[in-house]
Image (spheres, helix red, strand yellow):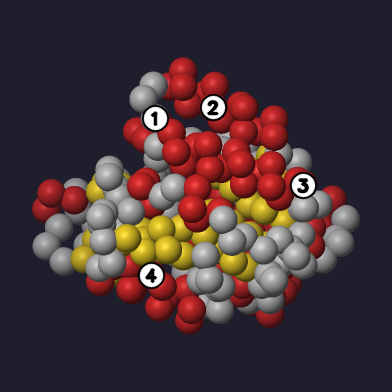
């Protein structure tokens, strides 16, 4: 099977075409979003095989997501569909500086209604890493237990587990619950990648900060798979994070290996 497995909630994203508050924007461009999906895209573009696990609605958004993933050469064997809940989506504006405004429409989404049935036929043979974040566990009690069970299954099958806390306070009942459950998950994993307002070590023009941490994760995971040393692992993670913030969407900056090598030749590191 694939080298990497990941589980999450993919969403259709509507990105504002103009730099205005969302209430004043008239036109949007349809794109795709989701932290784990971004990581899967980053890994696939770097030449690694990835399986993405989720549940989408039987609706046009769900079809769009599946078609998009296939074009990115991401395995969709573990994507289930339901006619009982819709695929989630979000809208995002453009800003000149700082984080953009993002509004989610994901409550009661198909992914939040996923059950352990999603884990029933997982084939871990040939896989080396499971990547999870703190987002999918925040969607419901069921998805939280699913994530923990999947981590245990991965360890039982000899996989390394990487974890990006990726805190989303709006998805949890309280900050206390978020901290408690995130710490539990972190303790179950082998590599934890907390973001402290991710700061890249490359001098680049910042267009949009969303997706920097996912770019960093794809760099760390890919470099780990390739057996690079710690310095090169961190360099690649920071480089891909820097490349992502130079782009508007959540994932358009994720490079191929040739694009990454060209970036490393071109951009000077910060002192």
Disc 1 to disc 2, C-alpha distance: 10 Å
Camera-side residue of 180 and 22: 180
Q: How far apart are marks 2 and 3 (CA)?
A: 22 Å
**Which residue is labeled 1 in the image?**
172
Locate residue 239, reporting x and y percent: 66, 60
Please say if the residues under marks 3 and 4 sit with CB atoms less than 8 Å apart.
no
Q: Where is residue 224 in the image (x, y as percent from the top left)?
A: 79, 58
Give the label on residue 65, or none: 4
Q: Real-space Cα distance between discs 3 and 4?
A: 31 Å
Q: Is mark 2 on a helix, strand or loop?
A: helix
Residue drawn 54% across and 27% down?
Answer: 181
Q: What residue sits 18% from the left and 51% below the top?
A: 22
Q: Which residue is pictured at 69% across the width and 30% down the height?
A: 187
Who is closer to the viewer here, 164 or 61?
61
Instruction: Give the total of numbered labels.
Output: 4
Whichever of labels 2 and 3 marks the residue nearer the N terminus, that label is 3
């Amino acid at each position: 099977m694939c080298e990497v497995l990941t589980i999450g909630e993919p969403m259709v994203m509507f990105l504002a075409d103009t730099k205005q508050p969302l209430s004043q924007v008239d036109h949007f461009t349809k794109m795709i979003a989701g932290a784990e999906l971004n990581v899967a895209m980053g890994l696939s573009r770097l030449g690694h095989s990835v399986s993405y696990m989720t549940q989408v609605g039987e609706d046009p958004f769900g079809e769009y997501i599946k078609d998009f993933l296939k074009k990115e050469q991401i395995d969709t064997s573990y994507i289930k569909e339901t006619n009982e809940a819709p695929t989630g989506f979000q809208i995002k504006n453009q800003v000149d500086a700082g984080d953009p405004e993002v509004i989610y429409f994901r409550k009661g989404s198909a992914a939040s209604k996923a059950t352990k049935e999603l884990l029933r036929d997982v084939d871990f043979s040939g896989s080396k890493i499971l990547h999870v974040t703190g987002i999918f566990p925040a969607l419901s009690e069921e998805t939280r237990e699913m994530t923990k069970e999947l981590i245990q299954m991965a360890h039982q099958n000899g996989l390394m587990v990487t974890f990006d806390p990726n805190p989303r306070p709006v998805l949890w009942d309280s900050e206390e619950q978020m901290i408690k459950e995130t710490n539990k998950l972190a303790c179950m994993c082998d590599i934890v990648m907390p973001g402290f307002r991710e700061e890249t070590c490359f001098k680049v023009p910042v267009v949009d900060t969303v997706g920097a941490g996912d770019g960093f994760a794809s760099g760390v995971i890919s470099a780990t798979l390739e057996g690079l040393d710690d310095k090169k692992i961190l360099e690649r993670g920071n480089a891909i994070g820097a490349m992502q913030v130079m782009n508007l969407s959540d994932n358009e900056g994720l490079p191929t290996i040739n694009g990454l090598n060209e970036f490393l030749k071109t951009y000077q590191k910060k002192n």
